[in-house]
Amino acid sequence: MSKGLLIIWTDVEPNAEADFNDWYDHQHLEERVGVPGFINGRRYSAIDGRPRYLAWYETDTPDVLGSAAYGERQSNPTPWTQRIMPNFRNVTRVTAEQIAKSGEGIGGWCTTLRFRPKESAKTPLFSWLTTKPNELVNSSKVVSALSWRPADADAAKGTTEAELRKNEEQPPAWGLLIETGSLEAAQRAVVGLAETITSLGGGDVETGYYRLGLLRIAN
């Protein structure tokens, strides 16, 4: 079975931003990575594009995101989490199945391309996303690349945390995550990708360039 991914893009109310960053660095990222089945977690700040913040986590399988352990955490947010999450804005949160991955390095930059395809485009886009990460790593200065599509497993549905952020949450998206060692390499790697996705029926593509802030690996 393929690995799972949890990906979150968000803005935050300016008056809560310092508290938000402390919470992510000193509690939230470590808490999430501590859920059984989570492999690692990363968080980033935008250099170009919105929302301003990105975080993503790899899991052993997509089913981890539907597990009782993950649901328990979502149902019992800490007091700090309860204070922070109502300040989330413009949220896209995706529980996902990894389609393909190439490269094992961790880059200082992560570029995301996310889109919401029409139903008739999902099969050709899945095929394209199956090969694209390997092509990117082999043909440009890309450290690693992976593609995803939304998964059904999500133990967060109806939980306390889901209620805290529900008014700001956008529909899930498909996409690509591309890790590089520089912004210049990221900009070169994405040339033509959005146009190809749109031509295959992916609709509008949202591209963001993010700098790595913190990485945590499960014990």
Image: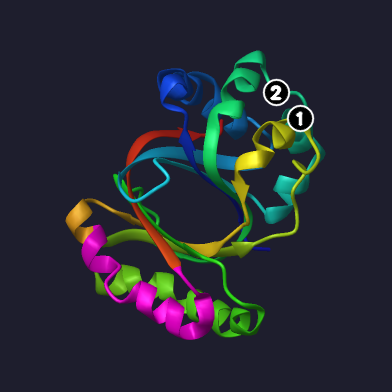
> Residue 59 location in percent, x, y?
61, 47
In screen coordinates, is 76 left or right of 184? Answer: right
- In the orientation shown, which residue stands out farthest toward the left? 184
Q: Earlier in the sequence, mark 2 or mark 1?
A: 2
Determine the residue positioned at 66% across, 79% down: 119
Stretch in magenta: 186-204
Q: Please tell me whether residue 195 belongs to the stretch shown in magenta.
A: yes
Question: Is residue 43 shown to the viewer in this render?
Answer: yes
- Quick check: 211 above or below 127? above
- Quick check: 9 above or below 187? above
Q: Give how far apart the Cα atoms at labels 2 and 1 are.
A: 7 Å
Q: What amino acid type is highlighted by mark number 2? A: Pro
Q: Nearer the viewer, residue 79 or 57?
A: 79
Q: Nearer the viewer, residue 85 or 151?
A: 85
The residue to which callout 1 is attached is 160
Of helix, strand and loop, which mostly describes the magenta segment?
Answer: helix
Determine the residue positioned at 74% across, 52% down: 63
Q: What amino acid type is highlighted by mark number 1? A: Thr
| Residues at marks 2 and 1 touching, judged by CB atoms closer than 8 Å | yes
User: What quarter of the picture does the N terminus occupy?
Assistant: bottom right
The residue to which callout 2 is attached is 77
- Quick check: 106 above or below 152? above
Other residues around mark 1 within 10 Å, as few (<14) / some (14–19) / many (≥20): some
User: What quarter of the picture does the C terminus occupy?
Assistant: top right
Label 2 or label 1, whichever lies nearer to me, is 1
Q: Give the numbered dot on residue 68.
A: none
Question: Is residue 141 shown to the viewer in this render?
Answer: no
In screen coordinates, is 166 left or right of 13? Answer: right
> Residue 84 location in percent, x, y?
57, 23
Which element carries disc 2, helix, strand or loop? loop
Q: Please tell me whether residue 123 belongs to the stretch shown in magenta.
A: no
Determine the residue positioned at 60% across, 16% down: 80
